[in-house]
Image (cartoon, helix red, strand yellow):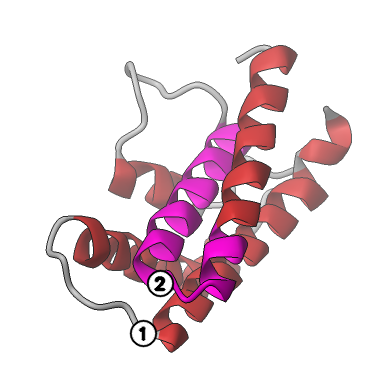
Amino acid sequence: MDNTEEQRRWGTAQELYHAADTVFHQQCYKACAGLAYYACFQAMWVALGDPPTGEWRHVGITRRFCHGQWATPPLLPSSLGTLHKRLLALYELRLDAHYRAREISLQQAQQGLEAVVEVLHLVQAHKIQRL
């Protein structure tokens, strides 16, 4: 992935995070869940670069990101274990919101926003500073 695409995807991750935060404050928790998930997805894509085969799959990108090999120096997978669980929960939350039409609570939406903040901070600290 070239620098232009990295910057485009990073900008998209930032925009999606800000949109998630905005709709959270408007009590639109289903929308927040989806936007938070896709903010994480784009940020993880920036960290990992181009996928090895065609396109990133949802669970695959999370697993690869949480192995920590994209960072310099690499992050220990054990240090990302809790984040991995939170990202998988956010993925399920997105499915609940957008596919299963289930209610999303304020607490669940807040947890999604917290996961985004953590992913954005990690990527910014270990990747963006070098772009």
Residue 52 painted magenta = no
The reply to whether callout 2 and callout 1 are in contact (CB within 8 Å) is: yes
Q: Can residue 30 be spotted in the picture?
A: yes
Characterize the local packing of mark 1: few (<14), some (14-19) or many (20 or more) Cα atoms within 10 angstroms: some
Q: Which residues are magenta?
A: 20-48
Q: Which mark is residue 105?
A: 1
Seen from the viewer's position, the closer of residues 80 and 12 is 12
Q: Tell me the amino acid under the disc marked 1.
A: Ser
Vertically, is 102 above or below 121? below
Q: Residue at x 64, y 17 (%)?
A: 5
Q: How many marks?
A: 2
Looking at the rendering, which quadrant does residue 99 occupy? bottom left
Residue 53 as seen in the image, left or right of residue 19: left
Q: Residue furthest right?
A: 129
The percent position of residue 47, horizontal first and vertical second, equals 62, 38
Q: Residues within 10 Å of mark 2 (few under 14, many from 20)?
A: many
Q: Along the polypeptide, which appears first: circle 2 or circle 1?
A: 2
Which label belongs to residue 29? 2
- The amino acid type of the residue labelled 2 equals Tyr
Q: Quadrant of the N terminus?
A: top right
Q: Nearer the viewer, residue 68 or 20?
A: 20
> Does residue 76 appear in the picture of this structure?
no
Relative placement, left or right, of 104 versus 47 is left
**Under tag 1, what secondary structure?**
loop
